[in-house]
Image (cartoon, helix red, strand yellow):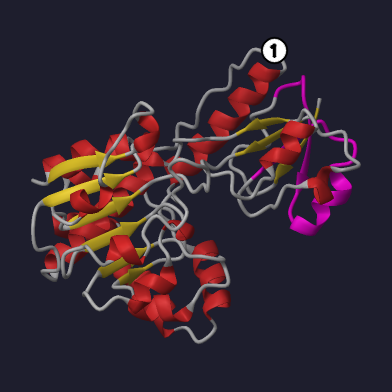
């Protein structure tokens, strides 16, 4: 089997055995030509995968080393019987650490005024975040109607109206009966407490940015994601207390884990035994929720990249540059 893989992925030269022939791409514009005779595409979220890219190729498997699949035209893959593999959950711990770092910073500047918290989206990240928030003394509930039965009748507004902290970790979709697209619109936002904290480490489209900017009640908005990335709205950057360049899931552990998870599924798809030994260079995971605020912020302080993004004149260029140059934790 011929594999075309992003050259920046760790251990990519040694992770495939003799059943696979590896080819690598360094530039996105190379993929269209290099993929033509390849059976597998192994990519990151920076590559847009659609009909234009794959139409004349031999590709039967598209594997992404990220948990999100926004960059992939899933409908095209289904119609053309192309297998989709993702690394969902591989960066969950990293995202949780990002949230804890935001909470640590906000606590130090006295911007969290209570202990009632709600997690929006109870998937891999939500499930791992809940006990960490509890360990910090928060009273935590979760909202995820897709995990309930069809008679689910949960009043989101009444629940959020009591919250001091709201952490968004839902998948972005526009499917009935519970679309997450524009979930935080003017109606929901207007019912929040004054100075309620929203931390969005999910997808930009879940929060209606125009509605958020129009709010008269003071909402403390912290975000790692934006509508129309990398063409982000500079007004949101000005508005946000914390704004980082979509790096919440970026850590050394997450980067390696995403590759291992995706490649293992590729092996399984082709019925090949997977026997790769995971990298010994990774250190044991340290959960930020086990550290005090000062210790957390020594590992990662979100205000550093926030200030850089706020000061940048060209927000698009800065977003791309800072995301690429972000130092992996650990």
Asked if residue 138 is positioned above or below residue 85 in the image, the reply reads below
Residue segment shown in magenta: 17-43
Residue at 69% across, 45% down:
73
The reply, left or right, for residue 330 in relation to residue 136 is right
- Magenta stretch contains residue 259: no
Whether residue 311 is visible here, answered yes or no, is: yes
Residue at 42% across, 69% down:
209
SS class, disc 1: loop
Q: Position of residue 89 (x, y in %)?
A: 44, 35
Based on the displayed image, in which of its 4 quarters is residue 74 positioned? Answer: top right
Count of all numbered marks drawn on residues in the image:
1
Based on the displayed image, in which of its 4 quarters is residue 79 positioned? Answer: top right
Residue at 22% across, 63% down:
191
Q: Position of residue 57 (x, y in %)?
A: 88, 39
The reply, left or right, for residue 149 in relation to residue 256 is left
| Along the line of sight, the residue nearer the viewer: 43 or 234 | 234
Quick one: label 1, few (<14), some, or many (20+) residues within 10 Å? few
Q: Position of residue 87 (x, y in %)?
A: 53, 35
The reply, left or right, for residue 276 in relation to residue 169 is right
- Magenta stretch contains residue 35: yes
Q: Which residue position is annotated with label 1?
A: 271
The reply, left or right, for residue 324 in relation to residue 145 is right
List the single residue furthest toward the bottom.
Answer: 313
Asked if residue 133 is positioned above or below residue 111 in the image, the reply reads above
| Along the line of sight, the residue nearer the viewer: 111 or 175 | 175
Q: Position of residue 298 (x, y in %)?
A: 24, 60
Whether residue 301 is visible here, answered yes or no, is: no
């Amino acid at each position: 089997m011929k594999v075309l893989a992003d050259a920046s992925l760790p251990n990519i030269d040694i992770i495939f055995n003799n059943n696979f022939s590896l080819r690598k791409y360094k530039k996105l514009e190379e993929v269209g030509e290099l993929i033509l005779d390849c059976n597998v595409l192994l990519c990151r979220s920076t590559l847009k995968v659609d009909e234009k890219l794959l139409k004349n190729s031999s590709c039967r498997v598209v594997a992404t080393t990220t948990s999100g699949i926004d960059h992939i035209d899933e409908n095209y893959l289904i119609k053309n019987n192309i297998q989709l593999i993702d690394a969902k959950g591989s960066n969950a711990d990293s995202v949780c650490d990002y949230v804890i770092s935001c909470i640590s910073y906000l606590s130090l500047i006295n911007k969290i005024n209570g202990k009632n918290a709600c997690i929006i989206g109870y998937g891999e990240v939500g499930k791992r975040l809940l006990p960490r928030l509890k360990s910090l003394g928060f009273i935590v509930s979760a909202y995820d109607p897709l995990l309930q039965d069809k008679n689910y009748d949960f009043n989101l507004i009444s629940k959020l109206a009591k919250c001091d902290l709201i952490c968004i970790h839902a998948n972005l979709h526009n499917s009935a009966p519970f679309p997450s697209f524009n979930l935080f619109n003017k109606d929901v936002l207007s019912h929040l407490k004054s100075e309620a904290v929203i931390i969005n480490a999910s997808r930009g489209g879940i929060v209606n940015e125009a509605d958020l900017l129009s709010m008269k009640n003071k909402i403390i908005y912290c975000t790692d994601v934006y509508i129309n990335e990398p063409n982000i709205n500079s007004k949101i950057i000005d508005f946000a207390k914390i704004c980082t360049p979509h790096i919440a899931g970026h850590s050394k552990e997450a980067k390696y884990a995403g590759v291992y998870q995706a490649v293992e599924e590729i092996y399984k798809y082709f019925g090949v035994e997977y026997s790769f030994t995971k990298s010994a260079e990774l250190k044991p995971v340290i959960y930020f929720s086990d550290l005090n605020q000062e210790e957390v912020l020594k590992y990662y302080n979100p205000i550093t990249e926030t200030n850089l993004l706020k000061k940048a004149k060209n927000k698009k260029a800065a977003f791309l540059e800072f995301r690429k140059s972000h130092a992996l934790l650990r």
